[in-house]
């Protein structure tokens, strides 16, 4: 469903409450160790400023759980944002209140004001209507650019939308467009790759994929549970015993829907993650004292041949313990295959995006999704509350 974005509304002279996801990692000295998320928000802020808006920016940082925590104040974020924008960024010491009301009222077109960490306020994660109204009272328009938070219904990304016209920022707009297209109107064959450590986190996604995609390639720790459900012995590998039934059901569902579900046929095994001498075995011959930590070379070939034929690729979760060099080859080989396939490709998930970057092929992926949990919930086929509240574009057919 096409949503209205900042490109569809008048912005000159408006005060805009802009919810972003600047939840950046900090090092032990409280410095920003990776500013990717701030950079991702720049196009929207520039667009608003260039359109003559006064821009109020709100974000969360970390998990202060409704209490002020000095180490999670946004001063470092304000400083970095100011550096990247090349203009002053004012900052409040509170989330809402008199100081904030005054600062917002005084804000002129072309100026930027960053509110204090919204999760300092106990009403934020409760989606408290009073807090939402307080946010709304600061501005004329609500812009949501926080795709990473879109699966949560909080006051600054959902509640506020009940009191102000609500539209998508450019990042949110791109996320929705890319994810919608790939899931609902994909160029076929649609190939999904799911890895990562645990099925538990991904049951919903696997269920949806087992009913919609043409091929489903499974690897990583998660695949172990599927292999075990099929009767293979996995030695000391990570296996979720309590998910064996769910895995067997997913296998049946895929068969019923004619989904070409591919499990590893060979594995890289070792004594543990620090073992420098891993070896390759078939899934039939995993030694009792070994752990499966990557997909084997034959599996990489099979996966790559499916990926080469794809029209669309969706990928979540690395296929091995890629953080260790000796277990990264499977994930990297698949990353290469996706990059070279010429398909429309989306990679989503904190670890798999890091893996694709480490493999040096990030530039060849059509869309790197900025959402972890949000992307997964989208792939579950659910409507995300942070997207649902945005206004629809008039005259939109569907
Ligand atoms: P994403 O962040 O892409 O959604 P996950 O968080 O689900 O991915 O999983 C990532 C983690 O899975 C990585 O830390 C990786 O080391 C781990 N992993 C992958 N394969 C295995 C395996 N065979 N055994 C144990 N852990 C694995
Ligand atoms: Mg992860």
Image: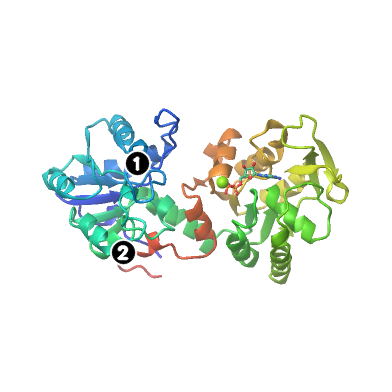
Residue visible at 29% across and 31% down in the picture: 79
- Around disc 1, counting alpha carbons within 10 Å, would you say few (fewer than 14), some (14 to 19), or many (20 or more)? some
What residue does disc 1 label?
69
What residue does disc 2 label?
391
Secondary structure of the residue carrying tag 1 is: loop
Residue visible at 80% across and 61% down in the picture: 230
Q: Which image quarter: residue 290?
A: top right
As drawn, 313 above or below 291: below
Q: Is residue 211 visible?
A: yes
Image location (x, y in percent) of residue 181: 49, 59
Residue visible at 62% across and 65% down in the picture: 207
**Quick one: quadrant of the N terminus?**
bottom left
Image location (x, y in percent) of residue 318: 63, 45
Q: Determine whether, in the image, residue 302 is placed left or right of residue 44.
A: right
Q: Which image quarter: residue 247?
A: bottom right
Image location (x, y in percent) of residue 350: 53, 44
Q: Is residue 296 visible?
A: no
Q: Kindly tell me whether mark 2's CB lies below 8 Å from ligand 1.
A: no
Q: Determine whether, in the image, residue 212 is placed left or right of residue 142.
A: right
Q: Determine whether, in the image, residue 285 is placed left or right of residue 132.
A: right
Nearer to the camera, 302 or 88: 88
Residue visible at 64% across and 39% down in the picture: 336
Mark identifier at residue 144: none
As drawn, 379 above or below 57: below
């Amino acid at each position: 469903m096409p949503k209205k974005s900042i490109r569809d509304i008048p912005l000159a002279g408006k005060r805009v409450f802009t919810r972003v996801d600047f939840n950046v990692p900090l090092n032990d000295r409280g410095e920003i160790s990776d500013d990717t998320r701030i950079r991702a928000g720049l196009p929207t802020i520039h667009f608003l400023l260039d359109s003559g808006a006064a821009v109020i920016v709100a974000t969360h940082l970390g998990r202060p759980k409704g209490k002020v925590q000095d180490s999670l104040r946004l001063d470092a974020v304000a400083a970095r944002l100011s550096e990247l924008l090349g203009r002053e960024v004012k900052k409040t010491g509170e989330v809402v209140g008199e100081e904030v009301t005054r600062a917002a009222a005084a804000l002129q077109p072309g100026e930027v004001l960053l509110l204090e960490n919204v999760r300092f306020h106990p009403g934020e994660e409760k989606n408290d209507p009073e807090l939402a109204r307080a946010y709304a009272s600061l501005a004329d328009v609500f812009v949501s650019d926080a795709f990473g938070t879109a699966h949560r219904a909080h006051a600054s990304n959902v509640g506020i939308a009940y009191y102000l016209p609500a539209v998508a920022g450019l990042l949110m707009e791109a996320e929705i467009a890319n994810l919608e297209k790939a899931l609902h109107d994909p160029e076929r064959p649609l190939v999904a790759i799911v890895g990562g450590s645990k099925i538990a986190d991904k049951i919903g996604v696997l269920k949806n994929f087992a009913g919609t995609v043409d091929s489903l390639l499974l690897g990583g720790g998660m695949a172990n549970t599927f292999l075990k459900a099929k009767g293979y012995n996995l030695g000391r590998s990570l296996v979720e015993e309590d998910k064996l039934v769910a895995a067997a059901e997913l296998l049946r569902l895929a068969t019923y829907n004619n989904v070409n579900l591919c499990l590893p046929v060979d594995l890289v095994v070792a004594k543990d993650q620090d073992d420098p001498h891993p070896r390759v075995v078939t899934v039939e011959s995993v030694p009792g004292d070994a752990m499966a930590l990557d997909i084997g070379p034959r599996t990489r070939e099979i996966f790559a041949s499916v990926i080469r034929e794809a029209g669309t690729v969706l990928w979540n979760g690395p296929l091995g313990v890629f953080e260790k060099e000796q277990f990264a080859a499977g994930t990297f080989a698949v990353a290469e295959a996706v990059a070279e396939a010429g398909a429309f490709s989306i990679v989503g998930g904190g670890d798999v995006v890091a893996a694709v970057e480490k493999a040096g092929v990030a530039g060849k992926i059509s869309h790197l999704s900025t959402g972890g949990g949000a992307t997964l919930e989208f792939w579950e086929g659910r409507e995300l509350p942070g997207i649902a509240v945005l206004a629809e574009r008039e005259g939109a057919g569907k």
